Structure formats: structure tokens, C-alpha cells
Image (cartoon, grey):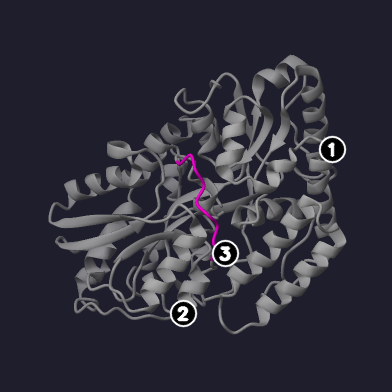
Amino acid sequence: MSKGTSLRYPGKLSRRRWQLAAVAGVGALALAGCGSSGGSSSSSSSSSTSAQGSATSGNIVWSASPIAGAGATDTRTVLINAFEKVYPNIHVTLVSASTDTDTNRATLATTISGGSSTPDVFMGDVIWPAQFGAHTLAVPLSNYLPSSYWAKFAPGLVQGASYKGKVYGSPLFEDQGFMYYRKDLLAKAGLPPPTTWEQLESEATTIEKKDGIKYGFVWQGDSYEGLTCNFMEYLTDAGGTVTNSDYTKATLDSPAALKAVTFMRGLITSGVTPSAVTTFQEPQAMNVFAAGQSVFLRNWDYAYSYATTPATSKLTASQVGVEPMPTFQGQPTPGYSNIGGWNMYINPHSKHIAADLTFIKWLSSTSAQTILAVKYSEIPTVESVRTSPSVVSLNPVLAIVGKTKLVPRPAGTPNYPALSTAIYTNVNAILAGSTSPSAGLSAAQSQASTALTTTSGGL
């Protein structure tokens, strides 16, 4: 969710496909991790100069989940049309992928492992490289694209797209969590935007009672990847981790994790957060806030546009504010924001590697990145675009990206799907009150330890 990513989303996309009113069913598997060594191209032109991305003709199939807009304004359609104007002899056919990232991941893994040459290129979560690389489900792009290509991306993005020294994903757009709030309600109460979790809980309680707002704070608490994204923010704020640095040992049964889940559960028992949050994914939380029924919202970068657009919200720009995530009292501010987003990958069985690379390179161009930022308020991955004054001035979200602190999910292992499942199923049980925080973390620790020692890599 993450809009993870990404997670949002975690990718974003099970975390962030707000354009759809209904939420797709969540698959049993979570997303994957962070890229691998491996797969060679089946393209006859893979060793030629054109395989570096200078092909000017060909036909490729692109699998991508919805990003924003619909019809002629669909982000994917707009990008394809702009690309084909530059490369009129390369035709891109769009295949719309599931809005549920777990389902999307499982479908692609099955299709590619079965030897299919389509899709040629696919948009995938930032946490897929380890699993997809370890199982030869994606081409190591660094075998084709020089170091100068990777130097243009914002810090940390290429590292997150790598596995065992090779880069598997070309960063397309970034997601991260933000705290949205009702500017008008805080101003009326004479309260500043909260910088700590404790302050947020206190202010939410005050405004709920004073103004009769239905909920104080909504977020993503369903048993799915988006909850892993939310949990990572609280856990890191509390000083905890999911695993050790080399992903060989789970560290979930810790005082920091206990602090995190106890506070999360306390938001529900105090009435600040509705008990129904245990079924909330991005759309439900977003719709509650957009309907004017919540003071605070945790969501991805797209939420500002959604919350201030008349067609999707009862609120206006004068009523909606955005800040970096809070942290726990006594910790340096701001709090940590889970990083998500989407990369572009190439199917190892593609017969059009040269044209695939041309398309991927164009998607990282100033033109494409500006379209994503200006038209759709996505966070660009290319540093020169994300720091451009014309982009920064577009909306409050893009203006504060540089002020946030980011934390990834523990996706550097091919076993990330099972690891994330261990997190979100047990944290959800804690939130629902069906198990105690200590018992839930003990179960998460046990399941995470098993996940880290399996040799299946999550497939």
C-alpha cells in the first residue's frame, strides 16, 4: 500500500486505487520484496545497441493497474499516447491489471513462471524485486542500462529496486504516507496540526466531542498489505524493526512493537478510531474523510487531490491540510512514513526487450515524470522533476515531500509475502481484540521466523 509500496502499496496499489468505489478481495499472499540476479532475455536483439533502449519500432504489451483518472484521462492511456507521439512506430497495448496488489503479484508470478512472453513490461510494487529477481520473474535492467541512467533517481529508490547487486525495477512514481487533517476544525478549536501520536489522539478526542464529528482518525487496519504499511510507521517511531539487517532473524516480539500495537489498539478502544477500521483499506478510510466524517486521515499522496475535488469529496482545499506523519512523544519529529510506489519491470520471456527498454526509459524521462506530477499529483522519482519549483508549487503534498522521513517495509527477502502476512494477520487480530498485544506479537514472531527460514521464496 502502499499507496505500500506499495504497498499505496506498497505499494500503492492495493493501498491506493481510490478511483474504484469497491475494494477487490484481498488474496492470501502479500506482496514481494526487492529484486535478484538473473534472468536473461529471449530477445534476439538483446545483445545489440538497440537493446539499451534506442529501438524505434515494435509492439509491446504493458500490464498496469489503474493509477488515476478514467477513459481519456486514465493515466496509463495519457502516458501511452504521449510515448507513441515520440515513438510512432512502437505500439503499446495496455492490459489492465488487478487493483489488488496481492492478486496482481500472484497473477504475474504464475503467468511469467509459466513461460508466457506477455506482458512484455509490467508495473509492479517497489517491494517485488527480491521475489521476482530470486525466481527469474524479471529482467535485471542493470545488465542493459548504464550507471548514468540510475543516477537521476531520488536517493534510495534504486537501492530499493535492487537485489544481490542488480537493479530489477525502474522507478516510475513514489508513494508515502501522509497525515491529512481538517484545517477548519483545528483552527476553530485553536489547535495546531499534531506532531506526535499522543497529540493527535488528544486533539481528535477534543474535536469529536466539541463539533460532533463522527470519527477522530481513520486509517488502514484491514488484514492486508496496507496494514503492514501502517504498522511499519508506528513500529519505527517506537524504535523497533521487523527483522535484523540481513533478514535472518525476526525481531517482532519486542518492547517497541508492543508499544506500537498497544497504541494502535488504544485508538480504537478510546473511540478516536472506529472499530470498523479493522475492515478499512484505502477507499473506505478515504471516503470517510472525504465525506467530512473524520478529523484526521492517514493515507497516500493521492489523497489530497481526492479530498479536494468536488466530484469525489464534500471538502474543499481551504478545509484540508497535510503534514508529515506524527511520531511518539519524546522522539525527533516528524515521524516515519512508509515508502511505497511502483516500478517498471521486464518479463524475462519478452521477445521485444529493445522496445521494452525504450518504453521504460521514456517513462523515466522529464516529460513522463512531469505528466505524472502535474496532471495526477504523483510523486516523481526523478530528482530534477521532484525538486522543480513548478512541481513543488502544485499542491501541499508535493511541497512537503522533502520534509518527510521514510521507512521501507522489510522487503529485501524473497520470503517477504509470508513475512508480511505474519505481520498483518496478527496485528489485525490485535486491533480487533480477538487476541492480546503480547499474544499477537508472539504469534507474529513465530510465523515471521518460519517465513524467513523457508526456501520457497514465497511463490
Residue 386 is situated, as x and y percent measured from the top left of the image, at: 46, 43
Tell me which numbered mark, 3 or 1, is placed earlier along the sequence.
3
Q: Is residue 213 left or right of residue 371?
A: right
Q: Is residue 412 left or right of residue 349?
A: right
In the rendered image, which residue does mark 2 sit on? Answer: 135
* Residue pictured at 55% horizontal, 41% vertical: 283
Dividing the picture into quadrants, the one containing residue 77 is top left
In the rendered image, which residue does mark 3 sit on? Answer: 30
- What amino acid type should be assigned to the residue bearing mark 2? His
- Whether residue 29 is in magenta: the answer is yes
Mark 3 nearby-residue class (10 Å; few <14, some 14–19, many ≥20): many
- What secondary structure is marked by label 2? loop
Residue 15 is situated, as x and y percent measured from the top left of the image, at: 55, 49
Residue range in magenta is 20-31
Dividing the picture into quadrants, the one containing residue 425 is bottom right
Dividing the picture into quadrants, the one containing residue 350 is bottom left
- What secondary structure is marked by label 1? loop
Tell me which numbered mark, 1 or 2, is placed earlier along the sequence.
2
In the figure, 333 relative to 352: above or below?
above
Distance of label 1 from label 2 (alpha carbons): 45 Å
Residue 139 appears in the picture as rendered: no
Distance of label 3 from label 1 (alpha carbons): 30 Å
Tell me which numbered mark, 3 or 2, is placed earlier along the sequence.
3
Front residue of 27 and 341: 27
Mark 2 nearby-residue class (10 Å; few <14, some 14–19, many ≥20): many
Mark 1 nearby-residue class (10 Å; few <14, some 14–19, many ≥20): few
Residue 49 appears in the picture as rendered: yes
In the figure, 174 relative to 345: above or below?
above
- What secondary structure is marked by label 3? loop
* Residue pictured at 56% horizontal, 82% vertical: 456
Say which of marks 3 and 2 sits in front: 3
In the rendered image, which residue does mark 1 sit on? Answer: 270
